[in-house]
Image (spheres, helix red, strand yellow):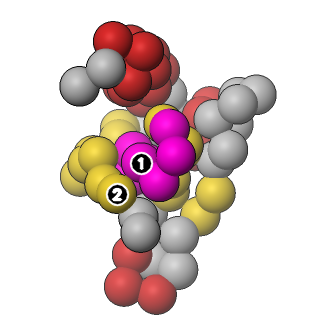
Amino acid sequence: MRGGFAARVERILARLDEAAGPADMDLPGFRLHRLKGGLAGYWSVGVSGNWRVIFRFEGAHARDVDLIDCH
């Protein structure tokens, strides 16, 4: 894993740990968006290229966090 990629994932995860809801993840460059279809209920932020961190919120806590290649 390239250093810049890992550092970006770490920043996203640190922010998720502090977030109380999806709006807290709506930061410049994160490209926050709600997912549809089989991943309805999840949110996504961009890492690099096709890579995304996906998650959902249960109350004020991020749950089911994953790193996926969306293509």
Residue type, mark 1 in image: Trp
Above or below, 19 against 62 in this view is: above
Question: At x 43% / y 38%, what residue is drawn?
Answer: 60
Q: Earlier in the sequence, mark 2 or mark 1?
A: 1
> Residue 21, percent across and down?
54, 40
Numbered-mark total: 2
Which portion, as a residue range, is magenta? 48-56
> Residue 3, percent across and down?
33, 12
- Element on which disc 2 rests: strand
Q: Does the magenta portion include 51?
A: yes
Question: At x 23% / y 25%, what residue is drawn?
Answer: 1
Q: Does the magenta portion include 18?
A: no
- Element on which disc 1 rests: strand
Q: Which residue is mark 1?
A: 51
> Residue 20, percent across and down?
50, 32
Q: Which residue is mark 2?
A: 69
Secondary structure mostly taken by the magenta-highlighted segment of the chain: strand
1 or 13: nearer the viewer: 1
**Residues tagged 2 and 1 counted as in contact (Cβ below 8 A):** yes
Farthest-out residue, front: 2
Question: At x 36% / y 85%, what residue is drawn?
Answer: 38
2 or 27: nearer the viewer: 2
Residue type, mark 2 in image: Asp
Q: Is residue 69 left or right of residue 64?
A: right
29 or 56: nearer the viewer: 29
> Residue 55, percent across and down?
37, 51
Question: At x 45% / y 77%, what residue is drawn?
Answer: 40
Which image quadrant: the C terminus?
A: bottom left
How crowded is the residue under tag 1: few (<14 C-alpha within 10 Å), some, or many (20+)? some
51 or 21: nearer the viewer: 51
Above or below, 35 against 36 in this view is: above
Q: Is residue 36 left or right of residue 18?
A: right
